[in-house]
Structure formats: structure tokens, C-alpha cells
Amino acid sequence: MERENRIWRLLLLALPLIVFSVLVIWPLLSSFYYSFTNWNGFSGDYEFVGLENFTRIWTDRLFFNAIINTAIWMAAAILLPTVLGLGLALLLDSKVRGAKVFKTVFYLPICLSAIVVGQIWVWIYQPDWGLLNTMIEQVTGDHFNYAWLARPGSALYSVIVAWSWQQTGLSMVIYLAGLTAVPSDLLEVCEIEGASAWQRVRHVIVPLLTPSTVVVVALSVINSLKGFDILFIMTGGGPFNSSDTLAMHMYNESFRKYLMGYGSAISVVLFLIALTIIGLYFRQLKKVDEIYG
Amino acid sequence: MKRITRRALLATAMAVSAAGFVAPLQAQAGEITISHYFTGELGLKAFNEQIKRFEDATGHTLKDSPVGHEDYKTDILVRASGNSLPDVFSYWAGARVQFIADSGALYPIDGMWERAGLSDVIAGSIAASATKYNGHRYLVPFNYHYAGMFYNKAVLEKAGVSDMPTDWQGFLDLCDKLKAAGVTPIALGSANRWPAQFWFDYLLLRTAGPEYRAKLMSGNASYDDAEVQRAMNMWKDLADKGYFTENANADSWTDASDKVARGDAAMTLMGTWITGYWNGLGLVPGEDYDFFAFPSIEDGVPVTSVGPVDGLVIAANAANPEGAEAFLDFMVSNTGVQAAWSKAQGALSANVKVDPSNYNPVMLKAFNTVDKSEAFAFNYDLATPPPVAEVGLSMFARFMDDPSQVNDILSQAAADAKAAFEQ
């Protein structure tokens, strides 16, 4: 009986294991393998070039451009949805009229795919008849046709705004859930003791929301690393690489320039960066766990 | 004219009957897989009609998987790396085919070319530039396009223009006149980068000539040469005078075409596919719009036409190379297929036996312009290897963003292109 059970367990485990190996582990290992070759993505014959791809990274102007953009992207994509989500959650938790409607409205964007969100914001940013420029024209009364997505100074930030618009709903919902766990009698005591609203938020609510913040930040980190599709739709990394992130740079090198070996090397570096960030984060997470159990 | 001998007649008769016997067998043995990027509403319908013609005529069956134009560039690469290329696929002649031919992913069609006598069917200049790679034939041209200065007739008439410019001064005068009439002379939509390349192509070809350009495209000349600087500075001159629509990098080529169709701008330098687009909007060729060839600039420089050639190629590991060859031959040799296709696509037929009266007046003019020009050149991103094309396309976008940076842009492009050629 016991033996039969074990066989069943192994059999049932084998299927997902095979699927996972074929679809995740194998491509991961191939990517490592190709990063040491000069494969162009087509050809059957290619050579091992040792560490050449990795040394080339250090002379690649566009790689450093992508690193800086990725840092800006990640910092903003973690900070903005978190802060905005917390602010919205606090506002909507205070039993304002129509809170339910607003909760739904703010949550809706997260149900859309990044492709749809990107396309909506492309329309909003359209220089001649887009919503944003039309509104600015109405307010100032002056002709205004700034091309938000087509100017190197604003392209990346414009995409960040669109991204935050979508992601804020998710953080808001997590914070709203966290707020239900904040004991109301504790807040009443604070109020009786004469703590101002700001002091209550600063010293009671936010510390008690730490577990929610852990979840929100973790999700933001993971989502921001995945934030390729919306950039691809809205700017394609352009104009002239001004909104290239590492993922976009990797795509360009592999699929537009046909340098699969070099693209793989970039993906290996991206993988190591992600691993480091997630590793550091999990160490922090353990500490939080120890405090909050 | 060759004398027909009895033996040749007999051989032909045997071949025909053999073909009739063999064809159904092959169809049973396996269908021909195909992939292509003709996915626009008009394109897909018309392509499927031509496939149907081939199936009816030969008994072969095709299994077809179309992919959108821009995605196709990546898709075919992914399929090649997975060793799962279809038997036949459409591809852009020039550096892209060179690139996959170098990788050994293509099947040479020299034998089929000879047997089908395609040298008599395909326009000489196209055959010379588009079909041969590394000494072998690999591609059958399916259609080609020509890039010219397409304009809104009503707008030019209103500005009092009746004669189209043939030289550079005439072109500058035209732009001045249009600007004075309150119309932006030139629309450019370079959001996807490639539409800007035609300006570089023509300015360089008309000043430095096709030979120099070929050198630049193959890495034997540099982007900071005086020739390139001169062409780019002529382009800068046009931009400085305010001849281009604002925010070129924010518009797609259809946005720019819409601006011309609406009369917000007078003209746009674009390929003949714009006729397919405009006809779809209800514009009448020759009445609502027309084109003129990019004006000559330097005397003694050969007149070159620019455009892409769409072709069909066979994968090296095709499961059904005989069927694939039959398909390629049929698609280019059958004048009915060629005429119907060029009409639907707003393209010029690669087959010289297609009666030019099939073309609408604008396409006929394009056909004659290419016919009379001394050379035919692929547009920039098909003329230079993909890694270099990336450098150039980014350079054009950066230039349109801020033309005053032209010197910086060229020295950066020179360094980047050199590095890209060395890879």
C-alpha cells in the first residue's frame, strides 16, 4: 500500500517536472550555453568565443544606457505604485461616499493586459489630438503638441506613468486588505490621547501595514522586471534607445541585429541582477518574518 | 527563335504527361508548408486567392501560416533557430536574404530557374540585384515597390504648382511655394524609423551615386565621409527651413499619409504601397494623388530608383522541395497571378510579361520610372546588414529629433557602424 502510494506520487510529480524542465530549465541552460558562442540565431554552425560576449558588454555604450534606464524604471516602478496605492487605500478606507465605486475604478486597469494599457496611453500621449495635450491646450489656451513618447527626454518617464497607472490598483487592494487588520480600538485610543491624523498614519497604521508593504514591494519588483511588453508597445525602446531597458536591449541585440550569442550574454547578466535583487529582498523578508511571525 | 525539333516535341509531351501523373502523387505525399507576411486585409485575401489558383492548377496543397509584417522579422528567425522553417516563405530581397543564405538556411533554386526559363520572365535589373546570393539563385521575386514623392494633387493645384520639379532648385522652389501657401510641404512619419531612410537613400544616391552608396552599405566607406555629410546637410537644410511636419518621430507612415490625404501636408516620400493604402481610403489614383520621381541633384550621377523587392525562398531542409519549386515558378510565371497580386498589393509585378495596362495610371507611371532609371537600389535597411541597419535607423530618428546635432550623429554612426561591420 505504502509502496504503491509512493509510485503514484512520483508519477504525478514527474509530469509537472518534465514540463518545467523542458519549458523553463532547458531554455535557461541553453541561454547560458549560447552566451559563450557567436551564434546568430539562424545558422547551424557557430563557434565558441569564450568570454568575448561578456567582455564586449563593457565597451557597449548602449548596455550602460540600458542599465541606467533599467535603474530608473525599477526605482520608479517600485516606488510610485507603492506610495500611490497606500495613499489611495488610506483615502478610500475612510468611508468616503462612493468609496466602493472608486475602489472598482482604481482596480480596473490591473485587469487589462499591458498591451491594451500601452495602446490607451499611446492615444493619451498622441501629440496632435491626444487627451493630455488637448487638456493642456484647454487650460493654457496655447497651441501645444509636445510628442511625449517621441522625445528622448520624456519617453521613458511617460511609459512609467502609464505603468504606475496600471499597477497602483493592485497595491491599493493589498493595502486595503491590510487595513482591515488594523484594530479600530487602537486607533480610537490614539484619537482620545490626542494623536493627529498624520501621527496615527505615521506611527500606527504604516508600521502595522509592514506585512502588506512586503507583499506590495515584492510584487512590484517582480512586475517591474517583467515590464517589457508595455515599453515594447509604447516606444519600442526608442526614440534612439532613450527608453531601452536591459530586457529591450537584449531583444534588440538578439532579434534585430541577429546577435543571439551577445543577446544571451546580456540575458545572463540580467538574470544575475534579478537573482541578486530577489536574494537581498528575501533576506530582508526573513527578518520581517521573524519580527511579525 | 529556336527551331522546334521533333525530339524536343516528344520530350515535352512526355514531360507534360509525366508531370500530370506525378503531381497528384506528390500532393498525397505531403503538402507544402508556407509562411508569409502578407497579412493586411487586402493582402491576405489576394494571397489566398493566388494560392488557390496554384492548388487548382497543380493539385498540390498548401498549408499556410501568415504572420504580421513587423513580427515576421523575429518570427522567421525563431523558426529558423528551432529548425522548423516552412518549405516556402516570403522574404525581403537584399541584405536579409544574404544573411540567411550565409547561414545555410536556404535551398538554391538554380536548376528550377533554368528549367522554367525565369531569366526571360523577370525584369533584368530585379533579377540582377535581388535573386543571386553567393553565386547561387535563392529567391524568386514576387513583386517590387518603388519609392517616390507622392503628393495631393488638389493641394499642389491650390498652391499654383503645375510643373513638378526635376532638379534640386526646382524642388526647393516648390517647397517655398507650398509654405507660402500655408501648407507644410513634406509629411514624414518615422515612428517606426524606416520611413526616414528613403530621404537618406535618395539624397546620397543623387549626390554621391550608387557606387559610393554600395561601398557605404558594405562597410567600405564611412559615415563621416564628405559624401555622407553633404547628403545629411542637404536634409538638415530642408528641416531647418521647416519643410517637414512637426514630430515626425511620433507619426507612423500611415499618419503621415493621412496628413497628405487630408491636405495638411502636400507630399510624402514613400513606397508604392501607399497607393494600396490610399485607394483603400477611396482616393482615386491620378485624380486625387500622383507622384514625381526624386529630383536629380548632381549632373552625371546615374538615376537610381529605390525600393524593396518581396520574394519567395525555399528552406534548405524543406520537406517538399519539388512542390516548393513548383509553387515559386507558378507564382512568378503565371501572369494572371502576377497581375491580380500587384493590383491588390499596390505593387509592381516582377514578371515583365504582365501587361502594363493592368496598372492604374499612377502605378503605370511608377513602372515606367523604374524602367527608365539606370539602376535599382534596395532601400537602406535591406541594403546593409541588419546590425548596421539598426545603427542607421536609430541615426535617422535621432537626426529627425534634432537636426542641429548632425555632426555628432554622423561621428557616432561612423563608430557604431564600424563596430557592427566587425562583428
Image (tube, rainbow, N blue to C red):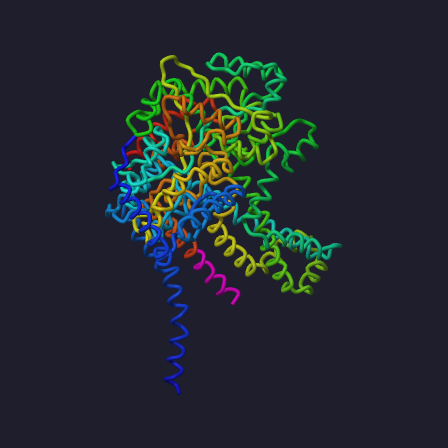
Q: Residue at x 26, y 43 (%)?
A: A52
Residue B238 in sight from this viewpoint? yes
Q: Residue at x 47, y 15 (%)?
A: B166
**Outermost residue, bottom side:** A1
Magenta stretch: give its range. Answer: A281-293
**Outermost residue, front side:** B6
Q: Nearer the viewer, residue A85 or B243?
A: B243
- How many labels were placed on the picture? 0
Residue B398 in sight from this viewpoint? no
**Residue B89 covered by magenta stretch:** no
Q: Residue B192: horizontal and vertical position, in percent?
A: 48, 36
Q: Residue B5: horizontal and vertical position, in percent?
A: 25, 38
Viewed as shown, does residue A190 lie left or right of B83? Answer: right
Viewed as shown, does residue B411 lie left or right of B196? Answer: left
Q: Nearer the viewer, residue A229 or B323?
A: B323
**Residue A289 covered by magenta stretch:** yes
**Outermost residue, right side:** A97
From the image, which quarter does the N terminus of chain A lie in? bottom left
Looking at the image, residue A285 lies above or below residue B397:
below
Q: Residue A37: horizontal and vertical position, in percent?
A: 27, 47
Q: Residue at x 67, y 63 (%)?
A: A186
Q: Residue at x 32, y 42 (%)?
A: B100
Predominant SS of the magenta segment: helix
Looking at the image, residue A26 lies above or below residue B186:
below
Looking at the image, residue B372 lies above or below residue A9:
above
Q: Residue B238: horizontal and vertical position, in percent?
A: 50, 19
Viewed as shown, does residue B122 lie left or right of B145? Answer: left
Q: Nearer the viewer, residue B117 or A28?
A: B117
